[in-house]
Amino acid sequence: MTRLQLFITKKWASLKHRNFRREDTWFYSHFVTAANEIGDHLSRFVRLNQSRVLDFGCGDGFTALGVIRFNTKEIVGVDLNLAYSYLPEISRRYLGMDTLPNNLSFQQVVEGEQLPFENASFNAIYAWSVLEHVQDVDYVMHELYRLLEPEGILFIQIEPLYHSPFGSHLLRLIQEPWAHLTMTGEAFLERARNAHDIVREEEKDLAYQTLAFIEFKKFLISEYKNLNRITMGELEAAAQNSGFNVLTQEKRQGHPYRPPMDLLERYPAEDLLTNDVRLTLRKPG
């Protein structure tokens, strides 16, 4: 274990057992919970201490910083936005780090343009709660395939899938399951626009902390409008069409709800009940 990994692990232990302030929960869920799942999972397929890893859609960078704890050789995060520019300040606040690890870097990218890396640049790639926001999934899958070395691993997580009870990504505003499918589009949006501040602690991300609530609602609604509504079957098809082999697939329900009959007549039950998915893909050698 490197000195940096040991330092962050000790800090994580102290974070885990203290009472979190309002803004802590989002950090913890990404720096610890998401990063642990990604690191544990990738470790089954690649040697992280010998791997260059791409965090596709890195957002604020909290998760990438957490995956570094697994003694990862290098992580590069890419995103359309610059939320990761706040990471030095956040890491000082929560971890007492004066500087970010020198094996962690970030780049802004442009949607629809080729990613700024050579072919076969990475040993592994992960996309955590990202691909449901991508407009051209087929193009992105081909790009990620291009960037992986032969036998490289791509780990994808999507939560929630669009047709699941809260697949609108607006649970922060509307708590009725499948409301985005049972209501007309305009009625659903009007209800979201009129919602009060009922955001749960674990959902109070960096955007929530920096925007007034009315602006935060606009941000959430714009995200909803841009969802690609991909299904599990469509995701698998895009992966296979790009040349990937499917190694593992895990579907999770994770909710107690049962869809109304009118929705079961319109959509496959599996799509309505599957809340999230984890998919491990390998580029053939």
Image: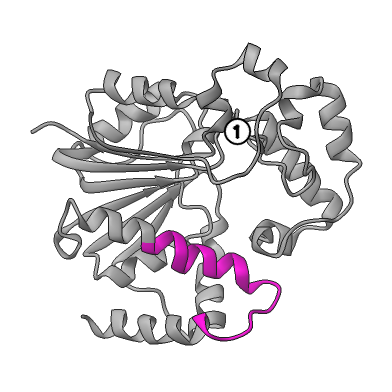
Q: Is residue 211 left or right of residue 231?
A: right
Q: Residue furthest top?
A: 265
Question: In the image, residue 214 lies at what x, y percent?
Answer: 86, 50
Give the residue type at disc 1: Ser
Q: Is residue 272 above or below residue 202?
A: above
Q: Quadrant of the N terminus?
A: bottom left
Q: Residue at x 30, y 79 (%)?
A: 5
Q: Is residue 220 left or right of residue 95?
A: right
Image quadrant where residue 138 sits: top left
The residue segment tinted magenta is 16-36
Q: Residue at x 88, y 35 (%)?
A: 191
Q: How many marks?
A: 1
Q: Nearer the viewer, residue 238 or 272?
A: 272
Q: Nearer the viewer, residue 264 or 148?
A: 264
Question: In the image, residue 163 lies at what x, y percent?
Answer: 60, 28
Q: Is residue 70 left or right of residue 19?
A: left
Question: In the image, residue 193 lies at what x, y percent?
Answer: 87, 39
Q: Residue at x 46, y 64 (%)?
A: 33
Residue under label 1: 164
Q: Is residue 228 visible?
A: no
Q: Main secondary structure of the magenta part?
A: helix
Residue 92 lies within the magenta run: no
Residue 28 lies within the magenta run: yes
